[in-house]
Structures are given as structure tokens and as C-alpha cells.
């Protein structure tokens, strides 16, 4: 049983993460994806022409993982182009987009997937966002897991 009392379901989620010069955040953000209680089926990391050590960091973190695709764009194309580039590769039923400086809670997939499956008409699911500033102060932006139909 999952934490919300429902039987476990197979993951049908792909994470798409564009990155541009966010090497300093990649260890934490990718670790959060790798340590989901219900792992994503696929993770697509698109480096958008970074000038920092992002590609080396990504390569070291995904070494030996066959569930991660690392794409290196030669030139910076912008976040929307990268999201579309990643979306073109998604074959799962669900996709989650996140930035390279986002850090997901460990139960993100475990909690989101059943919600979406129970609400077949939902086009997306959103969750609580906590923003931490440089001084370590946190601020919540939503209060509960929700689904929205369009």
C-alpha cells in the first residue's frame, strides 16, 4: 500500500529537466528525482548550451543509469525549446516538467500519479511549492495537492 492507502501502481511518468548553467543545483535536484518513492520511468535532462560545468556534473551523476537521457544542446535555445525537445521524446502517459534548480519532495510521483489516475479528466496536477531564498527562509505558495480539468 502507498502512504495514502491505495495499492502501488506502476510508474508511467517521465521527468523533463532543462538546464542552463545551474551546475551548482544539479546534485540536489537530480538526487531528488533518483530518490522518489515511486521512481519515474524516464528522466530526460537537456543541457541548453551551458558554459559552466553542468554537463560534467550531469554525466557523473547519471553514470550507470539506463533510465536517464542526457541531451547536450550546442547553443542556448531557451527553456521553452528545451521543454518541447524533451516532450518530443516522452512515451509515458504522464510528464513532469521541472527546472534544474527545483527539488521535488520524495513522494511527488507517489502522491501525484494516483490523483491523476482517479481524476481521468484532469489535464494537470499541481502540488505545494516551497521557495527557499538565499538566507534559508522558506515560503509556501499553495496549500494542497490539487488537480485541474481543462
Image: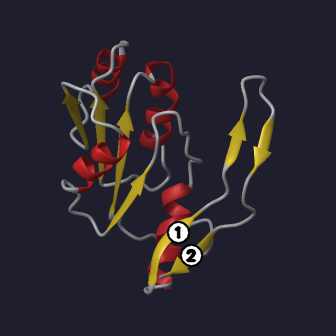
Q: Is residue 17 left or right of residue 136?
A: left
Give coordinates of residue 149: x percent, y percent: 50, 82
Residue 7 visible, this angle: no
In the rendered structure, are the residues bearing label 1 and label 2 in contact, judged by CB atoms less than 8 Å apart? yes
Residue 136: percent from the left, percent from the top?
A: 77, 27
Q: Looking at the picture, tell me which residue is in the foreground, 14 or 18.
A: 18
Residue ID for mark 1: 125
- The N terminus, quarter of image: bottom right
Residue 105 appears at what percent x and percent y?
A: 59, 48
Q: Is residue 127 above or below residue 4?
A: above
Q: Kindly identify the residue that appears in the image at 78 percent across and 38 percent down.
A: 138
- Work out whether residue 135 or residue 94 is closer to the camera in this orientation and state it: 135
Could you give the CA–CA distance between mark 1 and mark 2, rounded to whole angstroms? 4 Å
x and y, in percent, of residue 38 in the image: 45, 56
Can the viewer see residue 62 in this picture? yes
Location of residue 18 (image quadrant): top left
Compared with residue 146, is residue 99 higher up or lower down, i.e. above or below?
above
Q: Is residue 87 left or right of residue 33?
A: left
Q: Secondary structure at mark 2?
A: strand
- How packed mark 1 is, by other alpha carbons closer than 10 Å (few <14, some 14-19, many 20 or more), is some
Q: Which residue is mark 2?
A: 147
Label located before the other in sequence (1 or 2): 1
Q: Residue at x 47, y 82 (%)?
A: 150
Task: Give the residue drawn at x 49%, y 84%.
Answer: 118
Position of residue 76 relative to residue 102, above or below, is above
Colour pattern of the rendering: secondary structure
Residue 81 quadrant = top left
39 versus 76 height, above or below = below
Q: Nearer the viewer, residue 23 or 6?
A: 23
> Would you identify the image quadrant in which residue 9 lies?
bottom left
Viewer-closest of 146 and 3: 146
Element under disc 1: strand
Amino acid at each position: 500500500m502507498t502512504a495514502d492507502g491505495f495499492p502501488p501502481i506502476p510508474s508511467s511518468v517521465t521527468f523533463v529537466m532543462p538546464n542552463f548553467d545551474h551546475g551548482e543545483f544539479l546534485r540536489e535536484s537530480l538526487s531528488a528525482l533518483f530518490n522518489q518513492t515511486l521512481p519515474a520511468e524516464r528522466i530526460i535532462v537537456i543541457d541548453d548550451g551551458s558554459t559552466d560545468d553542468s554537463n560534467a556534473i550531469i554525466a557523473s551523476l547519471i553514470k550507470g543509469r539506463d533510465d536517464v537521457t542526457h541531451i547536450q544542446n550546442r547553443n542556448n535555445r531557451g527553456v521553452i525549446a528545451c521543454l518541447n525537445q524533451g516532450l518530443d521524446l516522452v512515451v509515458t502517459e504522464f510528464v513532469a516538467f521541472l527546472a534544474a534548480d527545483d527539488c521535488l519532495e520524495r513522494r511527488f510521483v507517489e502522491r501525484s500519479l494516483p490523483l491523476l489516475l482517479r481524476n481521468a479528466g484532469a489535464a494537470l496536477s499541481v502540488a505545494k511549492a516551497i521557495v527557499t531564498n538565499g538566507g534559508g527562509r522558506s515560503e509556501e505558495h499553495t496549500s494542497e495537492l490539487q488537480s485541474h480539468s481543462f
